[in-house]
Image (cartoon, rainbow, N blue to C red):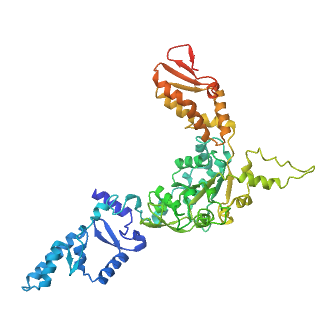
Amino acid sequence: MEHNQDELKEEYEKICFLCRRPESKTGKMVEMGNNICICQECMQKAVDSMQSSGLSYQDLLAMSSPFMTSVQEKNENSDQKIDSGHKENTDQEEKEDEGEKDGNTIRGMRIPNISMINLSDLLGGMGMGIPRQQQIKKKKPKEKQAEKAFDIKSIPAPHKIKASLDEYVVGQEYAKKVISVAVYNHYKRIGTGMMDDIEIEKSNMLMLGPTGCGKTYLVKTLARLLDVPLAIADATSLTEAGYIGDDIESVISRLLAAADNDVDRAEQGIVFIDEIDKIAKKRNANQRDVSGEAVQQGMLKLLEGSEVEVPVGAASKNAMVPMTTVNTKNILFICGGAFPGLEDIIKERLNKQAAIGFMGDLRDKYDADPDLLTKVTVEDLRNFGMIPEFIGRLPIIFSLRALTKDMLIRILQEPRNAIIKQYQKLLALDEVELTMDEGALEAIAEKALEKKTGARALRAIIEEFMLDIMYEIPKDENIGSVRITREYIEHTGGPVISLRNVTPQITCK
């Protein structure tokens, strides 16, 4: 265990037990024992406060916590040797000696009879003095960083990244192509670094699409395929500094946690901020907009690239946790949102061209257009409530298409973890085979389109009609297979159940 602690000390920075700043910020620290370190600034403040109160160093030892008992015993032994040379003691000294024995009086001052707190009981992690999630890894020298940089030839090509996404995500070919190229360039930016005078800049992305079209799922799937740290944050909880809610820097704190508090890895990661449309400017100007335009202004420095101080192991700077500096220059930001109401803004812009005459367009021409978001422009986003400075730092803007009936049918059965495959696995544990007719798949897709919640509606529909099947099948061990029909989905019939080693089929009603 001692060997492990020594390795952790070399790998992680020392952090002041009082102000929670790392050694890279404060300079060399004073070790107090029990893996507790105090920076020189906090030590000086303690000495100044002790002198202003009239206490001496020996008085401080008398009130110190148990980790200083060994030092106190040495001083007491030396004091006894000095006192043995003196034969006369004043009455005041006798009172002080009696006070030091019961711990109630020091230098004539009465202190409460309070047992001091054992700081070793409050220590977390691996004996490092602070909890494990708040420890900061030391930055490696630039020479070692250059040696550790991976080979550019080992970077997966965009078509390989897209092929991996195809196994989980159906459709959205353009969106998968854009993300694959962006991640590929991000890998190359990390691998090249500063090879010459030409510096490769990052290209942040803004992803639009209706609810349930696969925005978040696309990035979550990407997180499983990548080796770089990836953090998924939600913009709905972000507020302006000084208000209740998460600080803007909490987005980088999550990335730092995903990188195991390694600042070097976090500075090369990817951040996905979901529900970005929730920080649009509010139309009501009578109250302060603490979660809208103010958050967009605060995120400008993150998107552009700057050094920001972020808390380690917490979402707020006021949580008395260590602070570290992260450079967001090489962090790739992907923002996504459904932007409800943006279709109306696009229709209004397109309908301005409609007029009566031979060259006129019908005003309801775009009402039934499912891919209306693909016609979005920067001006539409500004009218929605996004400030120009924020949009300018997201140069790549693309949208995901709304799911069609054919895409929903493919989602049911083609992906590696398709919903039907999940239920087939559940019934296979009971040695029962589950199949679905083509008509049943079409009926499920038609019902999902009516709900207008995208792919999320598929599981809600399947959970509804699979409830009775999952409840009844474990009752009879003779059931061998179940086939779902369109009539069962439409509540006009039942599933076809086959018994083991029995040719006739039974239809439940």
Report whether 334 appears left or right of 121: right
Report whether 289 appears left or right of 261: right
Quadrant into which the C terminus falls? top right
Instruction: In this rendered view, identify the residue nearer to me: 223 or 340.
Output: 340
Against 31, is 188 above or below?
Answer: above
Q: Residue at x 68, y 38 (%)?
A: 450
Report whether 270 appears left or right of 139: right
Q: What percent of the width, then of the height, locates residue 493?
A: 62, 22
Quadrant into which the N terminus falls? bottom left
- In the rendered image, which quarter is residue 273 located in? bottom right
The mark tally for this picture is 0
Q: What percent of the width, then of the height, locates residue 321?
A: 42, 65
Asked if residue 193 can be seen in this view, the reply is: yes
**Residue extending farthest front:** 286
Q: Residue at x 42, y 70 (%)?
A: 24
Q: Residue at x 66, y 45 (%)?
A: 172
Q: What percent of the width, then of the height, locates residue 84?
A: 8, 81
Q: Residue at x 60, y 49 (%)?
A: 157
**Residue extending farthest left:** 87
Asked if residue 431 can be seen in this view, the reply is: no
- In the rendered image, which quarter is residue 125 located in? bottom left
Q: What percent of the width, then of the height, locates residue 413?
A: 60, 34
**Residue extending farthest right:** 358
